[in-house]
Every structure is written in C-alpha cells, then in structure tokens.
C-alpha cells in the first residue's frame, strides 16, 4: 500500500510539472518546439499568449527575414540586450535572443509580469491599449490597430481588463 501511495505521489508531481511547464512555454519544450515565422507554430494557450501573438504579428514576426524573425524576438523588444546582446535597428537596440523559444518566453514573461502581476515600472494594467502602443512602438497608430483587432478589444479599453486584473 505504501509503495502504491508513493507511486501515485510521484505520478502527481510528474503530471503537475509537465502541465505547468507546458503552460509556461505554450506547449514548447526542448524536443517538440519548432517555432518559425509561421503562426501555426507559435505558442498559445492563455490570454498572455494571445497578446504575445497579437504583438508578434504587429511587429512582423510572421514574415520570414524581418528583424523580429531573424533576431528571434517576436516582440521586437530591447530589455534582454544586456543578457543576450542586441543589434541596432531604426534607432533601437533590439535584443538578439539565442532561439525563438527564448524570445517568445521573454515576451510572455514581460507581459505576464506587467499586466497580470503589475510588476513593471513602464507598463500598467490600468493603461489603455493606446497608452501601451505609444510606449511600445514607434508606429503606434498601426500597431494598436494590429494588436487590438485580433484580440477583439477597443483601443480605449484598459489592458488589465483583458488579463482579468
């Protein structure tokens, strides 16, 4: 009986770890993750991934050869440059992530920390999508349209409302 309980406990831990790891990476792991510019390969699974995918599309990560594609940086973000290095593009130091999975996970974490946990000094759950666009993108007018359209939200909605915060 004791061995059965131990076996059940081990199975529960393995299942829990597998499910939480998959949720954190959108189903990617070192064996099955092959993210490309093709949107069907992009991580998905929760509202954070939905926003990450909308941002990636707005940044052009779905077009092979673009900066977000070649630098493995779907959000076209700069805040990982000290860790991974960067390249200058249009006046911005864009992080060059070592692989697409790392770039996608960094974007997910950035969005989760800012809008779910409220742990950003730049972004807030109380800002509107237009406010977010003005901070995130140079061409913010097109960016906000390209992000909010697929999410079916108004540009004047609070970002936190989409995340339930």
Image: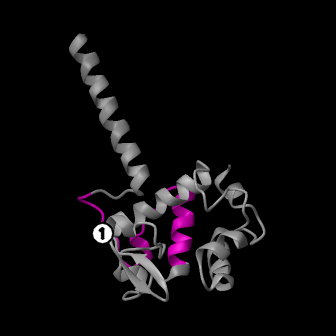
Number of residues whose C-alpha sits closer than 10 Å to that of mark 1, classed few (under 14), some (14–19) or many (20 or more): some
Please state, as top left, top right, bottom left or bottom right, where the N terminus lies in the image: top left
The reply to whether the magenta stretch includes residue 75 is no
Q: How many marks?
A: 1
* Residue drawn at (56%, 72%) of the image: 54
Q: Nearer the viewer, residue 47 or 90?
A: 90
126 shown above or below 144: above
Residue, disc 1: 34
Residue stretch rendered in magenta on the structure: 30-57
* Residue drawn at (49%, 89%) of the image: 90
Instruction: Single out the residue that lies furthest toward the right.
Output: 156
Image coordinates for residue 44, horizontal then vertical, percent: 47, 61
The reply to whether the magenta stretch includes residue 37 is yes
Q: Would residue 61 be visible to someone looking at this image?
A: no
134 shown above or below 80: below
**How is the rendered protein coloured?**
one colour
């Amino acid at each position: 009986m004791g061995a059965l309980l131990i076996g059940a406990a081990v199975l529960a831990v393995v299942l829990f770890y597998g499910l939480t790891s998959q949720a954190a990476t959108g189903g990617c792991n070192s064996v099955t993750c092959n993210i490309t510019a093709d949107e069907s390969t992009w991580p998905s699974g929760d509202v954070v991934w939905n926003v990450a995918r909308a941002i990636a599309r707005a940044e052009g990560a779905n077009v092979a050869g673009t900066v977000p594609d070649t630098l493995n940086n779907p959000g076209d973000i700069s805040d990982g440059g000290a860790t991974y290095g960067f390249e200058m593009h249009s006046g911005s130091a864009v992080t060059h992530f070592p692989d697409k999975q790392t770039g996608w996970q960094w974007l997910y974490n950035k969005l989760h920390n800012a809008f779910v946990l409220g742990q950003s000094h730049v972004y807030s759950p109380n800002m509107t999508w237009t406010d977010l666009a003005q901070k995130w993108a140079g061409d913010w007018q097109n960016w906000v349209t390209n992000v909010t359209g697929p999410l079916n939200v108004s540009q004047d909605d609070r970002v936190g409302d989409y995340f339930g915060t």
